[in-house]
Image: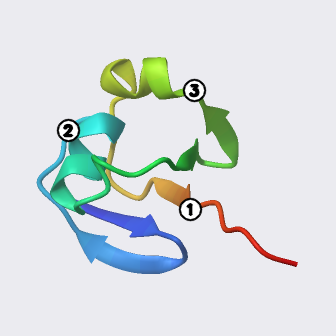
Amino acid sequence: MRIHVNGKQRDVAAATLADLLRELDYCDRVVATALNQHFVRRQDRGSVNLKEGDAVEIVVPRQGG
């Protein structure tokens, strides 16, 4: 299916947001996620289904100043 991840169009096989993080190798990282501009908690990612055209944002926290 074709979705947008961090503003870039991608073809993915993932069915859920948790699957997408595994597919994109984010599974071992601390990240914040949003689906169609709505924050998704870590514990809810496995039950959030993706559909064609969705927009996903994955944010990796950084340190520094």
The residue depicted at 24 percent of the width and 63 percent of the height is 24
Horizontally, residue 3 falls left or right of residue 15, namely right
Q: Position of residue 12 (x, y in %)?
A: 18, 62
Callout 3 touching callout 2 (CB < 8 Å)? no
Q: Which residue is mark 1?
A: 60
The residue depicted at 18 percent of the width and 47 percent of the height is 14
Horizontally, residue 3 falls left or right of residue 36, namely left
Q: Is residue 23 above or below residue 40?
A: below
Crowdedness near tag 2: few (<14), some (14–19) or many (≥20) residues, C-alpha within 10 Å: some
Crowdedness near tag 3: few (<14), some (14–19) or many (≥20) residues, C-alpha within 10 Å: few
What numbered label is drawn on residue 46?
none
Give how far apart the Cα atoms at labels 3 and 2 are. 17 Å
Quarter of the C terminus within the rendering = bottom right
Circle 2 sits in a helix, a strand or a loop, which is it? loop
Q: Which residue is mark 3?
A: 41
Under mark 2, the amino acid is Ala
Q: Which residue is mark 2?
A: 15
The residue depicted at 59 percent of the width and 60 percent of the height is 59
The image quarter in which residue 18 lies: top left
Horizontally, residue 13 falls left or right of residue 52, namely left
| Nearest to the observer: residue 58 or residue 65 | 65
Callout 2 touching callout 1 (CB < 8 Å)? no
Foreground label between 1 and 3: 1
The image quarter in which residue 63 lies: bottom right
Give how far apart the Cα atoms at labels 1 and 3 are. 14 Å
Number of marks in picture? 3
Under mark 1, the amino acid is Val
